[in-house]
Amino acid sequence: MNDLLAEAGRLLAAARRPVVFTGAGMSAESGVPTFRDAQTGLWQRYDPEQLATPAAFHADPALVWGWYEGRRHGVRRARPNPGHLAVAAIQARLRKTVVITQNVDDLHERGGVGAPVRLHGSLFAPRCSACGHPAPVPGDAPEPPAGPLPPPACARCAAPVRPGVVWFGEELPAQALAAAVEAASRCDLLLTVGTSALVHPAAEIPLVATRLGAPVVQVNPVPTPLDTVCAVNLRGPAGEVLPSLVRAAWPG
Ligand code: BV8
Ligand code: ZN
């Protein structure tokens, strides 16, 4: 690995406008399950891709709201891992770094990253499912919900409040997507971390960078569709590889 790490470190040290593009694997070592991890407990019988849809929420708001509240509860108990801290170290050293995340947790912010571009929203931005009015993040119950939990009612129109995430079949926030495409088309390096690169249109972002000649460095323990386009493929967990990459780029 160390030849690859040295090459990736050289590319990072030479970059002035890097993009760091992250997926669920970024938070795996913080104990936040990735989308493809087996669901636990009650949620075992549900496929996340079925639950993360407008139809599921319309059919059973309490089931979907309970699932998201359980995930939010898990994120509150999680801590940023050394991978999150390494991304913040890159942004601190290279001020023009843009972090683009598919994740809906807040671990990048809590790990010191300023204003990540959020392609799929956030667990911490609930809003009314009818009028869009922002709703308060519920107080933290001592225990996670063990199952379905009726969503709160909108303070303005009394319709059910929904999680502030992008569901399958929903468009990505236009401003975030435009900012991500803009950053990827101007970057001089794209570091993709912990994404299976299967969910579109987010999965196109690294391809925008390659089409415009920027090298892509990937961090993932397993192969992904991005293997064929990346300049350096670092096979390993983000929490170990990213701190080593920062050290390789800026020794001492
Ligand atoms: C849209 C928020 C249209 C919700 C999420 C067929 C072909 C192409 C596209 C489609 C298709 N059929 C349907 C579609 C569209 C669909 C899609 O892409 N489906 C996929 C499954 C094929 N996309 C959509 O619906 C999008 N919207 O297309 O709208 C439209 C157009 C006009 C008008 C109206 C509508 C919306 C997609 C957004 C869905 N929301 N999240 C929530 O979180 O509940 S996506 C969700 O899944 C996550 O946010 C994440 O983005 C994605 C999972 O991807 P990853 O982040 O990569 O996570 P994953 O678990 O998959 O992989 C983890 C990776 O980490 C693995 O590679 C693993 O090896 C690695 N890893 C593990 N441990 C570590 C690690 N890496 C590093 N370190 C470790 N320690
Ligand atoms: Zn409302």
Image (tube, rainbow, N blue to C red):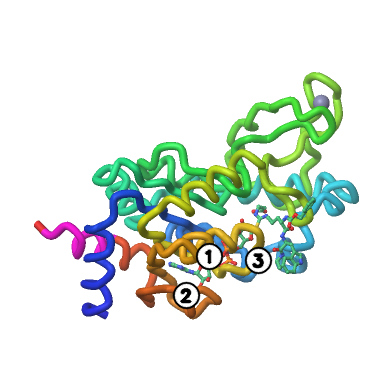
Residue 234 lies in quadrant: bottom left
Residue 26: give x, y in percent of width and height: 45, 59
Expressed as whole percent of the image width and height from the top left, the position of residue 46 reads 76, 65
The vertical placement of 64 against 230, above or below, is: above
Type of the residue with mark 3: Gln
Disc with the residue nearer the chain's start (1 vs 2)? 1
Q: Label for residue 207?
A: 1
User: How far across and down, in percent of the image, does residue 136 sit?
Assistant: 65, 27
The quarter in which the N terminus is drawn is bottom left
Q: Amino acid at mark 1?
A: Leu
- At a point 31% along the width and 67% down the height, the residue shown is 241
Tag 2 residue: 229
Marks 3 and 1, the one that precedes in the sequence: 3
Q: Secondary structure at mark 1?
A: helix
Residue drawn 9% across and 57% down? 252
Rendering coords of residue 105 (x, y %): 54, 47
Give, as a single range, the part of the protein colored magenta.
243-251
Q: Are marks 2 and 3 in contact (CB under 8 Å)?
A: no
Neighbours of disc 1 within 10 Å: few (<14), some (14-19), many (20+): many
* Label 2 C-beta lies within 8 Å of the nearest ligand 1 atom: no
Comparing 196 with 179, the one in front is 179
